[in-house]
Amino acid sequence: MKCRTCGGAAVLELRRHNAAFCTPDFFAFFRRQVAEAIRKHRMFSRDEEVLVAVSGGKDSLALWDVLIDEGYRTTGLYLDLGIFEYSVESRAKCDAFAASHGVPLLVSRVADEVGAPVPVIQRVTRRPPCSGCGLSKRYLMNRAALEHGFPVVATGHNLDDEAATLFGSVMHWQTESLARQSPALPSTHAKLVRRVKPLYRLSERESAAYAFLRRIDYIVDECPFAKGATSLAHKEILNRMEDAAPGAKHDFVFGFFDRARAAFETSQTAVLNECARCGAVTTGTICAFCKLADQVKRSS
Amino acid sequence: MKVILRHPRREVELAGQRRVKDVLRELAIVPETVLVIRGDELLTSDAVVAESETIELRPVMSGGAR
């Protein structure tokens, strides 16, 4: 198979683009997609320092690598979920990446902030582990950015993540979720930091290939709590559709962003308050994070 | 050839040489879900793997609370 750009030997075939690339031309393709995402959605400027949420996985470390390479000022944020050996190993990957690239890494421990690590949160709330985990992550990312003065948080969400989220929201017609899903969530309150997803144009496989070819040492093992997660089931369905019709995920996600999302956005007018307990932004009186921490405290 | 799979980690032996696309078809793996790795290189679907070689089919999916 030949590289579409230079005609040399290809290392990766991208069926949705009807193309294959050699390593240098794949890197150029990958960086162009990230640059286009940042430009199109005005994610951040070169004057702004970006807080990159890193998990030790392929996506977030690939994102951090590209942003550093493109000359952006970045700091990493690792959220220690307290998931046994998985968290120990993923933290080590982030530490090693930060040290080898000479970039700063902030660390926040969920157990310190919520009162217990993710495995205990799951037991106490009796909800799927990803539920309390996702809630804690979003809250702590925003808080860390506010505390350290970052105007924007970048996450490693890729095209497959966006497709799976969209699929789940459509399956249940969660119109509020559909209104919120975007490559860039602007700050709609002084205490809400902008959240952006510069990898949303790139598939999970492209992100993994970039990390592998760049020799980024990322955690390959899956989070032990992700087994059986709905998002993984949705990804499997979408990948079968992609196999039958290359470009299916791209068309689903880009079609939504370009043509459908606005219809849901206009129907939503949530009133934003500040949590009576911690001051974070919430649509109620007490935010979901404080309620979660209360639940953990009551059970201990 | 030896094929290394993950989640859970296991090994499969296949007799004879094969193209990558045939290995994936035989193991019922959707190409979009893995990187095919031989040593420090990635293989495209038309690459031929010799009987004496080892390849890794590394899953690219991650899930849960992203």
Image (cartoon, coloured by chain):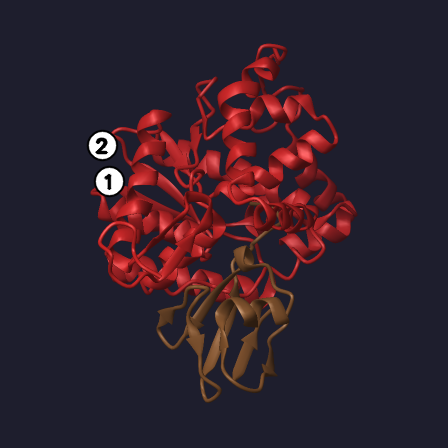
Q: Secondary structure at mark 1?
A: loop
Q: Chain B appears in which tint?
A: brown
Residue A58 horizontal/vertical position (percent): 44, 56
* Observer-nearest of A45 and A49: A45
Query: Which residue is depicted at the point 43% across and 75% down?
Result: B48
Query: Which residue is depicted at the point 76% across and 53% down?
Result: A123
* Observer-nearest of B47 and A280: B47
Numbered circles on residues, count: 2
What is the three-letter code of the residue carrying label 2?
Arg
Chain of the residue under the numbered disc 2 shown in the image? A
In the drawing, does residue A174 fall left or right of residue A140?
right
What is the three-letter code of the residue carrying label 1?
Tyr
Chain for colour red:
A
The answer to whether the residues at label 1 and label 2 have Cβ atoms under 8 Å apart is yes
Query: Which residue is depicted at the point 38% across and 58% down?
Result: A12
- The residues tagged by marks 1 and 2 sit, at their Cα atoms, a distance apart of 6 Å
In the drawing, does residue B12 fall left or right of residue A206?
right
In the drawing, does residue B65 fall left or right of residue A38?
right
> Which residue is labeled 2 in the image?
A46
Residue A54 horizontal/vertical position (percent): 43, 50
Where's the N terminus of chain A, which quadrant? bottom left
Q: Are marks 1 and 2 on the same chain?
A: yes
* Observer-nearest of A11 and A173: A11
Q: Residues within 10 Å of mark 1 (few under 14, many from 20)?
A: some
Chain of the residue under the numbered disc 1 shown in the image? A
Q: Which sits earlier in the primary sequence, circle 1 or circle 2? A: 2
Q: Which mark is residue A72?
A: 1
Q: Residues within 10 Å of mark 2 (few under 14, many from 20)?
A: few
Residue B49 horizontal/vertical position (percent): 45, 78
